[in-house]
Image (cartoon, rainbow, N blue to C red):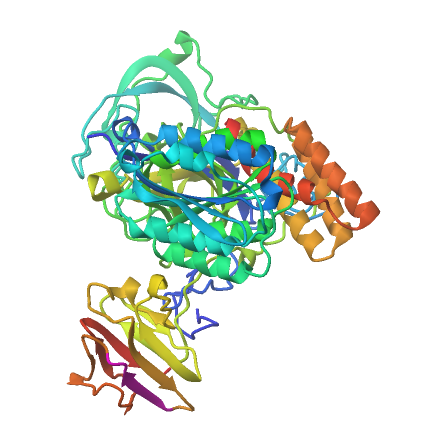
Amino acid sequence: MKCPKCGNENQSDAVFCDQCGQRLAQPVTPLPEAVSADQPTAQAGTCTRCGGVNTPGELFCGECGAPLEGPAPEAAAVAAAPAVMQPVVEPVALACPRCGAQAEPDDAFCAKCGAALAAASTTETGQPTATVNEQTAEPAPAEPSVAPAPVLSPEASQSLGEPEAAPSAPSECPSCGAHVAPEDAFCDFCGAALVGPAAATVTSSAPAASSATPAKAETGMPPAQPADLTATAAITAPTPVGPHLLVPDSGATIALSGPGEVLVGREDPFSNTFPDVDLTPHGGEAGGVSRRHFKITVGEGQFAIQDLNSTNATWLNRTRLQPGLPVALHDGDEIRAGKVKLVFRAG
Amino acid sequence: MPEHVSLTTRLNKGYVPVTSTPQLVYALLTAKPGETIARSRMALNFGFVLDRSGSMRGEKIARLIDAVRLALGKVSTDDLVSVTTFNDRADVVAAGARMSEHRSLADQIARIRAGGGTQMSRGLSLGLREVYRRFDKNRVNQVILLTDGQTYGDEEQCLRLANEAGDHHIAIQAFGLGSDWNESLLDEMARRSSGNSDLIESPDEIVPLFSQTVERSQRAIVRNARVTLRLVSGVVPRQVWQVTPVIANLGYAPIGEHDVQVELGELDAEQGKSLLVELVLPPRQAGRFRIAQAQLGYDLPLEHTSDVSGRSDIVVDYVTDPALVRTYDPTLMNIVEKVTAFKLQTRALEEAQQGNIIGATQKLRAAATRLLELGEDDLARAANQEADNLEQAGQMSSGGTKKLRYQTRKLTQEL
């Protein structure tokens, strides 16, 4: 995908430009394997009060603030997922197999490196619960309660047998096919969980049961509009397109406003010195940059540099400049102010 | 070894429906210093810059003197303190020095008298100089500015000084007393210097606010905190809000193809900071997905070190069971509602400023409804009153505007 700002060619699914950080005006597209067309359309959070259309999942109308009830999809269109009874497993404390960090007993993933722990860290106890598991064919009555894991009777638990052994993690993501490391808990590309039943035992991310937002009847709602992703308040640091200075040590770029003279030095408010380009953030103080070190004259495609009698001198392509004498400056020229190195780029 | 600062994450719902369209989830990220470092306290380099113009006469100047004396009672003998006053000129009442070195500071403060006009930049310039003169990167270097009136003609100079202060890591904590001061100016000065601004409605409130400011600065033991969100393909952040200690729109900066960074700045030893991140999720098939990893980086000036927290997974289950997707975290619901009320009043003030009376009135009424639902009756009344003012007179009152602007920021403080 080509960046509309700097023209850099980015990967097709890039959200931000690699070169300049510009948000790429790309709708959120489903991954190739995402969902089939017959899946329900998420109910747009259409406000019943003002008619404003909100992103599905939004809790309050962005226009009038009214609560948006029922951000769930058409309930009738989706068959309830089959459920199966599985014994509750009680994890034991262990060290992460990847980085060796000590893990808490309940941890499913290493807090330090993110590697999966759950598969290796569980032992059976006698407390069964119901959990959703799409790999089983044995349906259980769908539990409409908000509590996803009701405790079953001991009799029910006896028919469950031993817990399934955790399968070994795949080398490629079953969801998107991307290559994954054996110890990864989630695919780096699409985020899919890579540890099946073990991951399913992790319920800590599920929210507490609540009836704070009762779902309302969901009929006649228009399909959701894609979110206006360009409206976010992203703070970008675009690469200057005009003449600029490059700081090779940090990769930072400093735009040179023109036409006219651009004073480069080190800001010192207490002597009332405010150069156009302040090299303090780029090691100016330690590098011996003077408050008024040098200036660059920006003209019509022509540039010149002049040392301003700085204490530690200005060097152009490793040649010391005579103080007060302007010298032509060209694209790619190396400038050194004291110990601070810069590269001049004409555009 | 326990982490110096922990980062925890939770979602407004752990289950999202399998659909063909993008959808929104809210993630709450909380960064909090651990017990081992939460007891430590920062040394201070404080400069009080105090308005003593004619409008401060009477109770205001009396309470201000009380407040400074009480606040100084909370600093340690090693802390650096200076006191500067201004009307249409500026005077250094007490030059920057350790508390133990100050002689008769209380008497000097007690002799402050009100009179004259208001030229804030003069006081700020001298006060900043006192703090800068004793600048120490291992201390909290701060100016506490209090004014009760408009400064005339030197707003640009004030902003320039705020820029300088920010560049030299001196934060300006700007307090406006009463209703006749320029909140846009004080907000901008605070923003440019990485400080805060606040409203002091009555003189009685100066005393506790000054003391709280000193205590909060002593607890600012974590600096340069920033959260990195590593998003999986297709997940897009929409907005990032700071929700505690006060609500603010933080924004975020892209730092890679899928990574964004949110600057948190200083963390309070006891309270830390919480963020509400709005994430737009792409459609997915049923299954468990990690949508993002969050990691916190920070500096610990007392220990002269920097560190990062462990990575925290943000995981959702895409499900087809409609019962599951209707379960919400009530705490997050409450936070989102408060942020919504804040957003509405912010947009109302913006629209009122742009002359969109109808839009501003609607937003104010909507904000009032949300505030009533939240049990914030006083603020709801203020919002309705300002909506009435807009409808009848075409403009909002100065006091009501300030109350809404500053009090709705604090809606999350009872969490």
Q: Is residue A305 magenta?
A: yes
Q: Residue A7 lies in what quarter of the image? A: bottom left
Residue nearer the viewer, B46 or A89: B46
Q: Residue at x 39, y 28 (%)?
A: A204
Residue A72: x and y, percent? 60, 37
Q: Say left or right for A194 vs B204.
A: left
Residue nearer the viewer, B107 or B212: B107
Q: Residue A301 lies in what quarter of the image? A: bottom left
Q: Say left or right for A333 vs B11.
A: left
In the image, which residues are magenta? Answer: A302-309
Q: Residue A120 lies in what quarter of the image? A: top left
Q: Residue at x 78, y 47 (%)?
A: B390
Residue A196: x and y, percent? 34, 35
Residue B301: x and y, percent? 25, 42
Residue A218 visible, this orientation: no
Residue nearer the viewer, B301 or A208: B301
Q: Say left or right for B293 vs B189.
A: left
Q: Quadrant of the N terminus of chain B?
A: top left
Q: Most extreme residue toward the right, as rendered?
A: B392
Q: Say left or right for B27 vs B94.
A: right
